[in-house]
Amino acid sequence: MEIGSGDTEASPLLSLCSALSYGVASMAMVFINKAVLMEYRHSMTLLTLQQLATTLLIHFSRVMGYTKSKDVNMTTAKKLLPVSIFYNANVAFALASLKGVNIPMYIALKRLTPLAVLVAGIFMGKGRPSLQVSLSVMCTAVGVIIAAAGDFSFDLVGYSLALTSVFFQTMYLVLVEKSGAEDGLSSVELMFYNGFLSLPFLLFLIIATGEFPDSLSLLFAKANSLAFSVILILSLVMGIVLNYTMFLCTIVNSALTTTIVGVLKGVGSTTFGFVLLGGVKVHALNVTGLVINTAGGVWYSYAKYKQKMSKQRRLISDEEARQK
């Protein structure tokens, strides 16, 4: 299935399914990546393998006629290059941070992205956000600070990597909004360009960071383990599924819907993170901070939803006034 961003109106069932599939894939991906990185700490190599699997799958699907995605257009590729760089920088630092940060705190830190986007918007001249949006974003930030104070597994490097990931995710979102990169492209085409443009950048990184060739040697050694091989294959498959469902949800619904699904996914991931994969020492401050952070995330999504609905009502009222 390929959905473009043109004038095609998606059915309610497709909209619902795309949102649900993104939420499930996003939640599963956090745990699968965490499980892989507990056994195989070369996060850059893992990301490279995920993007390589995505690119090869789409290429061979196109050659065999299973997908109608178009050939590579260099003008489009140049336009999407900055988006791809920031996207992969975001994922790379997020993967690296998972090696030292437990899942509930990782999700709490990533929920600082709205605050970074809000600040970036002010500097870009978009004006001041509404009071509810500002307060909800501050609530998420306060929650992170409280939770960090009660995090006995605090890892300075892991926290720094997660916060750097927040910066790159902010840049990625700002660039997508500014360039309108998804216009006229299907979700599969967006995936292919992202993977195709990512590979040279990622290959340079695994060499520059010293992961190569030790990462490949360890990978072949670990391949003898059936359990690790299954988890790795799951990670590669879910990397494809996550990218597809993310682009599909954004195209079929909107970036706002994708953000709301991300917040709700974070609630489930935080809950499961306390009982799966270990690494979490429960403390009153930790739990209180995560609850405040989650509440701020839900509040933010609700405030943005109300803002959007209010804008739509104004547009409808203006249109009705012009017709009278």
Image: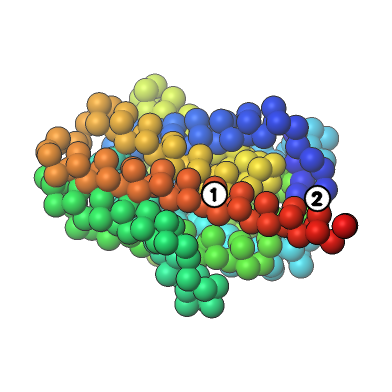
- Crowdedness near tag 1: few (<14), some (14–19) or many (≥20) residues, C-alpha within 10 Å: few
Which residue is labeled 2 in the image? 6
Q: Residue at x 37, y 54 (%)?
A: 136
Q: Quadrant of the N terminus?
A: top right
Residue 51 visible in the current orientation: no
Q: Is residue 57 left or right of residue 143?
A: right
Q: Nearer the viewer, residue 248 or 66?
A: 248
Q: Amino acid at mark 2?
A: Gly
Q: Is residue 156 left or right of residue 29?
A: left
Q: Residue at x 71, y 31 (%)?
A: 12
Quarter holding residue 298:
top left
Q: Is residue 207 left or right of residue 12?
A: left
Q: Earlier in the sequence, mark 2 or mark 1?
A: 2
Q: Nearer the viewer, residue 126 or 1?
A: 126
User: Given the current orientation, which residue lies at the most extreme front position?
Assistant: 324
Badge 2 marks a residue whose secondary structure is loop
Q: Position of residue 307 (x, y in %)?
A: 55, 54
**Residue 227, labelled with which disc?**
none
Q: Amino acid at mark 1?
A: Lys
User: Considering only vertical position in the picture, is 107 above or below 81?
Assistant: above
Q: How is the image coloured?
A: rainbow
Badge 1 marks a residue whose secondary structure is helix
Which residue is labeled 1 in the image? 306
